[in-house]
Image: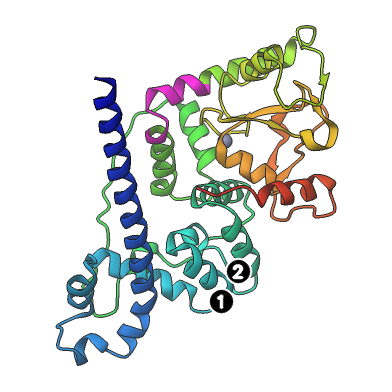
Amino acid sequence: MIKNSNIAKREIDSLHQEFKTYGKNAREWIQKCKMLLPKIQKQEVWKKKGFTSIYEYARVLAGMSTHAVDDALWVMKKLEARPHLKKVAKKKGLNAVRPVLTIATEKDEKEWAKKAQKMSQNTLKMYVKNCREKGLVHEEKQSEECSRVNPGQKNQKKTKTSIYMKLDVQTIERLKKIKGEKDWDELLNMMIDVMEGEGGAGARERAEAMRSARAIGTARSKDVPAPVNTGKRYIPAKIKRHVIKKTGGCCAYPGCTKPYDILHHTKRFAIDSTHDSDTLKPLCKGHERIAHEGLIENEESSSGDAEKWSIKMQADVLNPKYQVDEVVGQYYMPM
Ligand SMILES: [Zn+2]
């Protein structure tokens, strides 16, 4: 019986492995096709080879959908005068640079390329979102859905409709505050992303728990466990419990409602070998990566209060912490 189940497990593992390998290769080859599309289009290769359109050409030869072709041409157009980002796209795929396509300018694309090279797509997306919230980056004015449509294609503009909602005045004020310069579609989509990503109602509860726990956490200082200076990376349970309780199990970055993934040493354990509940922060994977890129302002605010955190555009490369992170980062595989 045990023997049979071992064989079955091995078979599943090997099927899974085989599928994964083929999938990875397929994605890589499709990326190569996508990068060729602008030239195929410019030289009308499809026409010269007897196809009725570039869409038919890409569908028949590479199994690409119309949307995938439009999207790839749009991304490649954005990358035209951005050689550094283009290089990253070639290496990591078009999605790796997608979060910065509408904000990277010819002047700062090199900096964005460095970030896109180091961060995963999700981390970069989160970083850009935080930069937007702080007003550090500016969107291109041109409308997204118009620019995506290929010349010669019929206009595929999204239909918009009005809705009427009866809301509390306070709710409206709060919504307006977080909306800022964004349009309503963008804001609501960001909210939907959070809710979907966090399992709906769970996110609300966590956000609530986070708020109340933060209030309690700042008031009760006598319950704070003493810092432990040790050579061991293992965080003592008492400190761990205390730190997680402070944010209700959420990421400590202001406004982030994701559950925490990692307890992050804002002073870097490699430097001070200390586990201190004032400087340890529960963070989601994205914000932990952003912290290790040195891109969080006031990371070590003296009160240990993450509310003072915000995003910044440049890391302080002279900070010893940054140098530690650079070394550790070499062993980190972005997902
Ligand atoms: Zn977070």
Q: Tell me how far mark 1 sits from mark 2, CA to CA.
A: 8 Å
Q: Is residue 265 above or below residue 127?
A: above
Judged from the image, the secondary structure of the residue bearing numbered disc 1 is helix
- On screen, residue 148 versus residue 295, left or right, reads left
Horizontal placement of 39 versus 298: left or right?
A: left
- Please rate how many residues cluster around mark 1, counting C-alpha atoms within 10 Å: few if below 14, some from 14 to 19, many from 20: some
Q: Which residues are magenta?
A: 196-207
Residue 33 shows in this picture: yes
Please name whichever residue, 107 or 226, is drawn nearer the observer in this view of the structure.
226
> On residue 83, which mark appears?
1
CB contact under 8 Å: marks 1 and 2: yes
Residue 267 vs 244, above or below: the answer is below
Q: Position of residue 326 (x, y in %)?
A: 73, 51
Question: Who's the residue at 66% across and 52% down the image?
Answer: 330
Q: What residue is drawn where x is 84% and y is 48%?
A: 319
What amino acid is found at the position of numbered circle 1 in the picture? Pro
Is there any visible trace of residue 73 in the rendered image?
no
Main SS class of the magenta portion in the image: helix
Label 2, secondary structure: give it: helix
Give the quarter of the image for residue 255. Answer: top right
Kind of residue sitting beneath label 2: Glu
Q: Which mark is residue 242?
A: none
Tell me how the rendering is colored: rainbow
Q: Quadrant of residue 187?
A: top left
Quadrant of the rendered image containing residue 157: bottom left
Coordinates of residue 310 in the picture (x, y in percent): 68, 41
Residue holding disc 2: 109
Ligand 1 within 8 Å of the CB at mark 1: no
